[in-house]
Structure formats: C-alpha cells, structure tokens
C-alpha cells in the first residue's frame, strides 16, 4: 500500500508539472501571437509610410530646380511665369503655408496648373484615414505616379485668391474629357476642409455640383460638403459614405462623383458604386482609367517669354 501511495503521489506531481507546463506554453503562444500581430501592424505602417516618396528620400533628382532667382514660388502659375515651362515636380510655398512642399506642375493647357490629385494605374491605395488625406500620400517621384497632395496644402493653395479647378478624365477606350469649375476653394481644418466651387464648363458633364438635373442636387451636390474618411464621417448620409465607397472625398448622400474610389478597369460590379466615378460621363458602374485634378489662379495670364 505504501508503495502504491508513493507512486500515486509521484504521478500526481508529474501531472501537476505537465499542467503547469501546458499553461506556460499557452501563455507563450498568446504572447507570440500578440507580438506577430504587432509586427504585422508595424509592417503595414512602414509600407504605407514608404509610399510617401518626398524629396528627402532620394527624389531630389526628379525635382526641377528654380535656379538662383528664388527657392520656391506660391504655386505653379507663378513658377510658369518665372520662365519654367517644363511639367514636373517643383518646390513651392503658398503664402500661409508654414513649410515649402513638393507638387506637380502641369504646364500644358496654357500652363501654371498645380496638380493635387492623380490616378493613373491603381498603384496607390486611396482607401485611407483622415490623417493620410490631411498630410498627403502617394508617389511624388514618377511623372505618372498616383497621389493626393494633402488637404492642408490644398487649403493653403486655394486660400491665396480666386482659383479655377480643372479635372481631366480619360476612359479605357482612350477618350478624354474635362470638367472645369470657377471659384474653387478648400477651407481649413477647423471646417473639416469644406469644399466650395462655382460654375461648371467642359465636356464631361457636371457631376460635382449635381447640375445635370435640378431634382438631384439634394444628394448629388458636393459643394459645401466637408471632407470625409472612414474614420471621420462628415457626410449627409445615415451611414458612412467613405467606408462604403472605400475613399476619402467630399461626400453628400453619397455621390455623383468619387474620383478617389477603388481602381477598376472600366465596367465593374460591386456592392456599392465605389469605383473611380464621374456619373455624367460613364455612370456609376464604370471606373475611369486616369484622372488629374488641378488648380490655377482665375486671372492667370501666361507669360510667353
């Protein structure tokens, strides 16, 4: 009996030790899983950060030097009239901006256009949070790279005076159209980068102000709308337009224009109309191939010298 009891105690002790080891292993597994998740989040953050390619990350060779006359100008119109007629990235510093920044100047169509948005191939993720859209993101190195300049910079640019907005659109059949709006302006952060603009002209139809029919303005007019992202819902919709449409934009209820939507290749099918949409040209279920949104002072007169 004594021998049996001794074996029983040893077996019980071994069982307790096994149970403790099992608990320790479970705790280690949970800790490893937590660390893996942290590393995954860190990798995602680093990859998104790497997408922002400013001049201090080896892009200096792609920046066009303004020469000895001045280091930077207020916008691309001033750069053009200083004699720089080549399209490309330039440093500029609008009047109220605390820092200079890099922006693409389109010197075609009369010259002097500051480009603040470009879609070309779907290489950049535009389904981003408020902070990304506020500061800007994308490829600021390639002549055809996709980017959003940043709502802060867009506010500084358009606060300098009366600016015209031009939107160049191309479909997958190679056709090009444009939409142009007077008095384009983006308010500051305190008003959530609210957008305003005036009269439309162009060949693509008026999707930005709902001018294609008077009965749709209550949901299709993007004027006076604050900017919305999936983590900052400022639209007039009961749900979250930015979350549904996978983009940051001046959503109403929700849109007849969404140029920051998901990049499909022409006609698409999805749960919502979340493509790169300009309703008055191709409707909701066709995603455009390329888009460029750019601004220029309304009173701009090109210096041809």
Image (tube, rainbow, N blue to C red):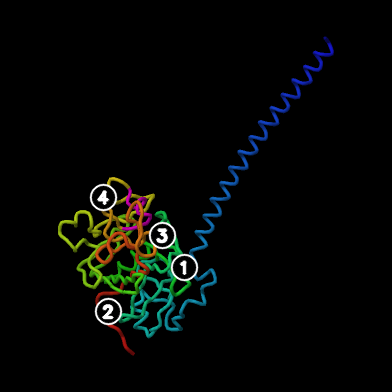
Q: Is residue 32 visible?
A: yes
Q: Is residue 246 magenta?
A: yes
Q: Which residue is mark 2?
A: 300
User: How far apart are labels 3 and 2 at the CA level?
Assistant: 31 Å
Compare marks 3 and 1 and give the one earlier in the sequence. 3
Q: Residues within 10 Å of mark 4 (few under 14, many from 20)?
A: some
User: Residue, x 34% and y 80% (percent of image)?
Assistant: 108
Q: Which residues are magenta?
A: 240-249
Above/below status of 103 relative to 192: below
Q: Position of residue 214 (x, y in %)?
A: 15, 59
Q: Which residue is mark 3?
A: 126
Compare marks 4 and 3 and give the one earlier in the sequence. 3
Q: Position of residue 100 (x, y in %)?
A: 43, 70
Q: Is residue 163 visible?
A: no
Above/below status of 128 relative to 278: above
Q: Is residue 297 magenta?
A: no
Q: Which residue is mark 4?
A: 236
Q: Position of residue 98 (x, y in %)?
A: 40, 65
User: How far apart are labels 3 and 1 at the CA level?
Assistant: 12 Å
Task: Please tell me whether mark 2 sits on a helix, a strand or a loop.
Answer: loop
Q: Which residue is mark 1?
A: 139
User: Residue, x 67% and y 33% (percent of image)?
Assistant: 24
- Closer mark to the observer between disc 2 and disc 1: 1
Task: Please tell me whether mark 1 sits on a helix, a strand or a loop.
Answer: loop
Q: In the depicted view, which residue is nearer to us: 190 or 249? A: 249
- Quarter of the picture containing the N terminus is top right
User: How far apart are labels 2 and 4 at the CA level?
Assistant: 35 Å
């Amino acid at each position: 009996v004594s021998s049996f009891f001794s074996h029983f105690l040893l077996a019980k002790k071994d069982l307790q030790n096994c149970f403790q080891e099992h608990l320790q292993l479970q705790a280690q597994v949970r800790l490893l899983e937590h660390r893996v998740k942290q590393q995954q989040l860190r990798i995602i953050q680093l990859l998104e950060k790497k997408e922002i390619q400013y001049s201090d990350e080896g892009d200096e060779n792609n920046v066009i030097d303004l020469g000895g006359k001045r280091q930077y100008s207020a916008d691309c119109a001033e750069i053009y009239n200083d004699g720089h007629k080549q399209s490309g990235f330039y440093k500029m510093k609008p009047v109220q901006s605390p820092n200079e920044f890099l922006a693409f100047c389109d010197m075609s169509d009369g010259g002097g256009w500051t480009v603040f948005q470009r879609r070309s191939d779907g290489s950049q993720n535009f389904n981003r949070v408020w902070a990304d859209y506020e500061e800007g993101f994308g490829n600021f190195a390639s002549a055809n790279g996709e980017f959003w300049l940043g709502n802060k910079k867009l506010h500084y640019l358009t606060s300098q005076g009366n600016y015209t907005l031009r939107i160049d659109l191309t479909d997958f059949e190679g056709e090009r159209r444009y939409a142009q709006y007077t008095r384009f302006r983006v308010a500051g952060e305190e008003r959530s980068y609210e957008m305003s603009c005036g009269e439309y002209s162009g060949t693509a139809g008026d999707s930005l102000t709902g001018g294609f029919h008077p009965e749709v303005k209550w949901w299709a007019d993007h004027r006076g709308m604050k900017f919305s992202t999936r983590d900052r819902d400022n639209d007039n919709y009961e749900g979250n337009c930015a979350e549904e449409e996978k983009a940051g934009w001046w959503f109403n209820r929700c849109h007849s224009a969404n140029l920051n939507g998901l990049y499909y290749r022409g006609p698409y099918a999805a749960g919502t109309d979340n493509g790169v949409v300009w309703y008055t040209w191709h409707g909701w279920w066709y995603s455009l191939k390329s888009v460029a949104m750019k601004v220029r002072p309304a009173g701009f007169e090109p210096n041809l010298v």
